[in-house]
Amino acid sequence: MRFLFYTHSLVSDWNHGNAHFLRGVMRELLRRGHDAVALEPSDSWSRLNLIADQGVGAIAAFRKHFPELRTVVYGTDFDHEAAVADADVVVVHEWTDPQLVARLGRFRRDDSGFRLAFHDTHHRAVSAKADIAGLDLSHYDFVLAFGEALRERYLKAGWGKHVHVWHEAADTSLFHPLPQTEKRGDLVWIGNWGDDERSAEIMSFLVEPTRRLKLATTVRGVRYPVAALKALRDAGIVYGGWVANAAVPRAFAEHRATIHIPRRPYIEALPGIPTIRVFEALACGIPLISAPWNDAEGLFRPGKDFVVARNGKEMRRHLRQVLSDRAFAQELALSGLEAIAARHTCRHRVDELLEILARYRPGKPPDERAALKEAAI
């Protein structure tokens, strides 16, 4: 089949974690003999910030690391109708311009030759509901939501008749253990500051434990304000700025532990949805300690695949144990690897996507049995 992905960006992962997942999904589709192309707007916020931060060399590095991936940058004069005419499946990310979202829906209404899906991997359904409510999804075959709580939001609001859970996952062809890598530090956290959605948590679960335990800690990510950078320096934390996702497995391998600090909207309104870094870290075989997070869907085995720290004090205790007890750290890492291999690779997600697509036939309404089965979930 021919897959067309409308993305915010495939080339840039600057403050754009969904690029990680789509790269893995596209690579898996290509391995199976399908065709996959990504489209991204010429004014992509992520790509423009990446170039401003790192220069065009970062774009060249993407081409080097992912030579098999094809992406097309479109402007105002791009012929979208011709692009979708050659596709069997079109997947539209929720950061796509609302007018284009509606336009692609009209193409689907008038052309029964392809299946059209809307893909949501953010918390705007709860944090900016008007933005999602304003999207015209009336002619989309189905919605892919990256968690059950998000799926329920869509159904309750009437934003889609057919909504399926499609969690993110690890691209294990890229994210895997690198056992021969020399350890250079104790703790690494790879995460962006964002919009003050976890600023207090970063201080409590990262900065203070590092300062009190005198850990060799590295932070990689973007959008850190001056005050945050000062707090990192005062705690002795090395801040390295942006890191390309292709380099993250080595960053994990060079450290003895990592942490997960979820953003507040996911804790408060969308339980069960982890950041993609959880999948990627566990796939790399690094022990993971998480700030409070409700694994409402049972994706993992908290306490076995990773440990949970309810507060800063518990974070310090867990860090001491992981860094001093090699057997415990290894057991945690192996369990996390096992969980990823069993359920959470891009191979699994492509299987799920193909299963969902099988319920929808071009030119026909969704299979009634599939709709009844979905309604019963």
Image (cartoon, rainbow, N blue to C red):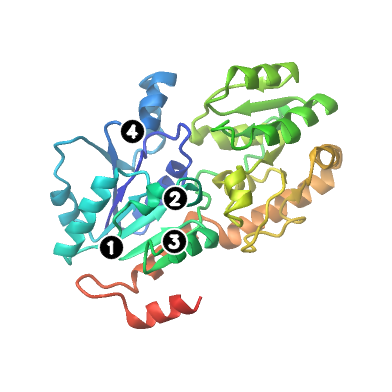
The structure residue drawn at horizontal position 39% and vertical position 38%, both measured from the top left corner, is: 66
The structure residue drawn at horizontal position 46% and vertical position 65%, both measured from the top left corner, is: 156
CA separation in Å, label 1 and label 2: 17 Å
Numbered circle sitting on residue 129: 2
- Amino acid under disc 4: Ser
Q: Is residue 351 left or right of residue 242?
A: left
Chain-order first, disc 4 or disc 1: 4
CA separation in Å, label 4 and label 2: 22 Å
Q: How many marks?
A: 4
Q: Which residue is label 1 attached to?
A: 138
Q: Is residue 88 left or right of residue 173?
A: left
Between residue 294 and residue 332, name the one nearer to us: 294
Disc 1 is placed on an element classified as loop
Quarter assignment of residue 41: top left
The structure residue drawn at horizontal position 15% and vertical position 56%, both measured from the top left corner, is: 85
Q: Which residue is label 3 attached to?
A: 154
Chain-order first, disc 2 or disc 3: 2
- Amino acid under disc 2: Lys
Residue 176 location in percent, x, y? 58, 45
Mark 1 touching mark 3, by CB under 8 A?
Answer: no
